[in-house]
Image (cartoon, grey):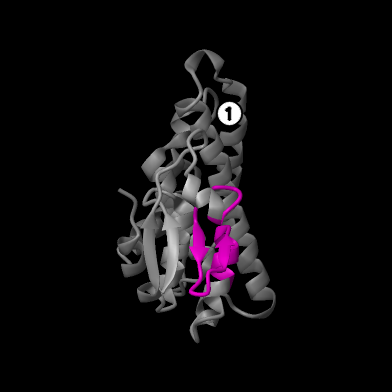
Amino acid sequence: MMKLYSSVTSPFVRKVLVVGHELGLADQLEVVPVVLSPTATDAALNQRNPLGKIPTLELEDGTMLFDSRVIVTHLLTLSDKAELVLPRGKKGLLTLRAEAAADGLLDAGILSRYETVLRPEQYRWSAWVDGQCDKVERALRWLEENIDTTGSSFDLAKIATACALGWLQFRKPLNDRSQGEKHMELIAPKLFTWFESVRSRPSLLASEPH
């Protein structure tokens, strides 16, 4: 069995778990909880992943894979349902582009959250927070225009977007910006309406942060 070093609140871990469920591989993933932060790493995890980050996947032969996209790529090789998650050809390329947009949104949102939650108040940089939140907003607007919310498919673009939206609702990083729209649903109304329609999907329910 593969070991997935993870945290229940990580959207990148959630993406891996959702892909695992969608591919029928969830029973091959042993979830190993790890508690860490940017200022408090885990010594055992550092031995497995030099970046000390999650998700990290340990294969049965001891090989370590890290970064959610690398892990997802490996899971796709293990299932005959791979094309449902990542289509072939140009459609697959555009799917990966959307995944990158959703992941980039999360990167910016997480950096903003670190600034407001972890940095001592007297050292916080509001312009930095606003800049990261601007990236979140631009990514939301882009995803609003580029994710097909009408079809029944649930490919990697939609998986990554759903995980990003779930994290945004869970952490609400835009609340900390000093300028700009704070209400995510007003920025991407179609996207959040779609998310409400799919959030009861078994793979999303099984990986919901708490």
Q: Residue furthest top?
A: 122
> At which x and y percent is residue 105?
56, 47
- Asked whether the viewer can see residue 190, the reply is no
Q: Is residue 98 left or right of residue 198?
A: right
Question: In the depicted view, which residue is nearer to us: 5 or 129?
Answer: 5
Q: In the rendered image, which quarter is residue 74 located in? A: bottom right
> At which x and y percent is residue 193?
39, 55
Question: In the depicted view, which residue is nearer to us: 210 or 40?
Answer: 40
- On whether residue 159 falls in the magenta region, the answer is no
What residue sits right under mark 1 in the picture? 130
Residue at (59%, 71%) from the top-left corner?
73
- On whether residue 58 falls in the magenta region, the answer is yes
Residue at (63%, 65%) from the top-left corner?
96
Q: Residue type at mark 1?
A: Asp
Residue at (67%, 70%) from the top-left corner?
93
Q: Is residue 116 above or below residue 76?
A: above
Q: Is residue 107 left or right of residue 206?
A: right
> At which x and y percent is residue 12?
49, 55
- Crowding near the residue tagged with mark 1, few <14, some 14–19, many ≥20 C-alpha atoms within 10 Å: some
Question: In the depicted view, which residue is nearer to us: 182 or 57?
Answer: 57
- Asked whether the viewer can see residue 2, the reply is yes
* Number of numbered callouts drawn: 1
Question: In the depicted view, which residue is nearer to us: 142 or 77?
Answer: 77
Q: Is residue 159 above or below residue 187?
A: below
Residue at (39%, 75%) from the top-left corner?
28
Q: Which residues are magenta?
A: 48-73
Q: In the rendered image, which quarter is residue 198 located in? A: bottom left
Q: Is residue 101 above or below residue 95?
A: above
Secondary structure at badge 1 equals helix
Q: Quadrant of the N terminus?
A: bottom left
